[in-house]
Image (cartoon, coloured by chain):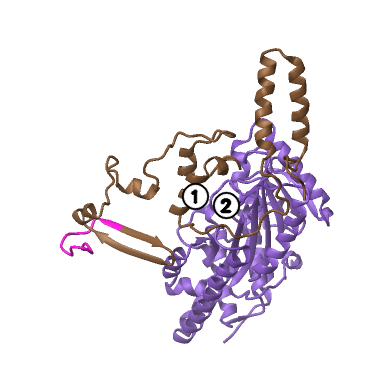
Chain colours: A purple, B brown
């Protein structure tokens, strides 16, 4: 039963009680081809081959695997979609592809909205490191590819939002206390005024609330200032959010200790004793449990383990496990849908088995 | 809720104005809204729609000479079709960016190699047109010449342009 813990990623990052991950993406286009929406004949294929070729020549090229999105089997596509490695736009172009490092934190979308979209994700609040990695790959690619630019507009991209540095800085935050205290509406307004976009994570599912209190925060435009200034601006804002979240957390705990204990322990009971659990239920409860870890009401599990659970219990990945692993289920767990929900609770219970509650 | 201006009538519209680092919100009744120029009547030169789209009177039928994207498309979608669009619609795009609140000059980094800025994209498209025409006129000698040059252009990933390489 204990084999699931080996699948859990245990890498930790700075400020990980609030910031799940930081990612940097760089949008680039080759000079000699129209942008993907305007591809003619075999433009898409040529761009793809040129970018694949560039990736095969860079340092540590053997770490990158290049594949066409349409060559993947449907389940593989869905897992990549779940992990935000490809987007739904990728399916509209027959020549869209990815170059991906095996551990999955660094990847490049080819022929999505732009010819090249390089993405680096690191755990915790660490955008500077992510940018360094992304920039070094960009520098290497530039030895083999000429990217379109102009003096007035910087790097040229299909979308005005990325025009300029082509840089998109995204922080994935877990804000249970701010959400619970109702401050989140004010946060939305404040960020909007500063040109920062905030979205519910997992927007593909179109919920009207943030499932698991997860939010994506990113810069709206890439035109103003240098790359470093853009990173600094959004980092300062995230710094403030971290401060507010921690302050609110302490206030909640001081003002209503019994209510918070109930909130956390109820979720723990749900995760520990349910046999069949849906994704939405699991996310909400795991989010409360994570809140309990931060409030020191729960011991025996850390933030990064819970964050990787967020990712592991997604639908398509569980379907993949069902196919590839030999798992034994009870007799009445017969259809695939119910097996997915059963497996989800098995994995969660394996990971949280060592949890102790404070009294 | 009462109108924020006259404080007598019931407010029927809600206006949120976003400028740099500041959001102003106010509720207006119909009369006060009209006085301030908020109307959805398209004929009115200063209607809400025109006000928001920024450009009141510009040539929306102009198209990019390389990829054929129309300015109307660019304005509506805030997206372009190719790198040359930025050259072709430079003034118009600067105007749109202004209306989106982007006013500063670009100060970030640039590609390592900036060659004479003439991409092979334009060359390729012109050559393709010449090739098609030559085939149509059954001038195969010329056609072969164009085809060979196209082949070379299609293979190069870095624009050779006519400028000096650094």
Q: What secondary structure is found at the residue carrying circle 2? A: loop
- Residue A32 in the image: x percent, y percent? 68, 39
Are the residues flagged by discs 2 and 1 from a single subunit?
Answer: no
User: Which residue is at 67% across, 13% downward?
Assistant: B137
**Chain of the residue on which disc 2 is drawn:** A
The answer to whether mark 2 and mark 1 are in CB contact below 8 A is yes
- Badge 2: how crowded within 10 Å, few (<14), some, or many (20+)? some
Q: How many marks?
A: 2
Foreground residue among A263 and B136: B136
Foreground residue among B19 and A26: B19
Q: Is residue A324 left or right of residue B85?
A: right
Q: Which residues are magenta?
A: B1-14
Which residue sits furthest top?
B138
Q: What residue is pinned by disc 1?
A: B94
Q: What secondary structure is found at the residue carrying circle 1? A: helix
Can you see residue A136?
A: yes
Can you see residue A348?
A: no
Q: Which mark is residue A136?
A: none
- Residue A213 in the image: x percent, y percent? 52, 67
- Residue A292 in the image: x percent, y percent? 56, 78
């Amino acid at each position: 039963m204990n084999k699931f813990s080996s699948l859990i990623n245990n890498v930790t990052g700075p400020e990980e009680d609030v910031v799940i991950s930081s990612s940097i993406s760089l949008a680039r286009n080759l000079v000699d081809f129209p942008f993907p929406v305007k591809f003619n004949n075999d433009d898409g294929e040529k761009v793809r081959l040129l970018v694949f070729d560039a990736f095969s020549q860079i340092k540590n090229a053997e770490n990158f695997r290049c594949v066409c999105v349409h060559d993947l089997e449907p389940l593989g596509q869905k897992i990549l979609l779940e992990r935000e490695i490809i987007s739904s736009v990728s399916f509209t172009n027959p020549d869209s592809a990815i170059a991906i490092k095996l551990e999955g934190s660094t990847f490049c979308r080819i022929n999505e909205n732009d010819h090249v979209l390089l993405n680096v994700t690191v755990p915790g609040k660490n955008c500077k490191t992510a940018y360094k990695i992304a920039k070094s790959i960009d520098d290497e690619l530039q030895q083999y590819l000429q990217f379109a630019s102009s003096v007035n507009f910087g790097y040229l991209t299909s979308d005005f939002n990325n025009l300029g540095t082509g840089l998109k800085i995204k922080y994935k935050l877990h804000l249970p206390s701010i959400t619970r205290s109702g401050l989140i509406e004010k946060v939305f307004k404040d960020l909007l005024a500063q040109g920062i976009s905030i979205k519910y994570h997992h927007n593909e599912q179109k919920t009207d609330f943030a499932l698991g209190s997860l939010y994506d925060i990113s810069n709206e435009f890439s035109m103003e200032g240098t790359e470093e200034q853009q990173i600094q601006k959004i980092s300062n804002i995230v710094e403030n959010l971290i401060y507010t979240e921690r302050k609110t957390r302490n206030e909640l705990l001081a003002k209503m200790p019994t209510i918070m204990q109930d909130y956390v322990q109820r979720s723990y009971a749900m995760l520990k004793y349910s046999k069949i659990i849906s994704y939405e239920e699991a996310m909400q409860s795991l989010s409360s449990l994570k809140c309990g870890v931060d409030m020191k009401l729960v011991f025996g599990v850390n933030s990064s383990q819970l964050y990787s659970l967020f990712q592991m219990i997604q639908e398509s990945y569980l379907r993949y496990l069902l196919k590839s692993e030999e798992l034994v289920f009870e007799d009445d767990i017969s259809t695939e849908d119910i097996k997915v929900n059963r497996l989800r609770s098995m994995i969660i219970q394996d990971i949280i088995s060592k949890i102790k509650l404070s009294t | 809720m009462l109108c924020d201006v006259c404080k007598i009538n019931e407010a029927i519209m809600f206006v949120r104005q976003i400028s740099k680092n500041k959001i102003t919100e106010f509720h207006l009744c119909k009369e006060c809204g009209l006085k301030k120029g908020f109307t959805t009547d398209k004929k009115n030169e200063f209607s809400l729609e025109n006000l928001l789209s920024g450009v009141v009177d510009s040539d929306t039928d102009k198209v990019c000479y390389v990829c054929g994207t129309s300015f109307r498309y660019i304005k509506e979608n805030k997206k372009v079709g190719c790198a040359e669009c930025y050259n072709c619609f430079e003034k118009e795009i600067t105007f749109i960016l202004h209306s989106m609140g982007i006013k500063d000059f670009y100060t970030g980094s640039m590609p390592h190699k900036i060659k004479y800025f003439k991409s092979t994209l334009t060359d390729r498209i012109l050559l393709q047109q010449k090739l098609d025409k030559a085939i149509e006129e059954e001038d195969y000698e010329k056609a072969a010449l164009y085809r060979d040059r196209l082949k070379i252009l299609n293979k190069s990933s870095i624009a050779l342009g006519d400028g000096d390489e650094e």
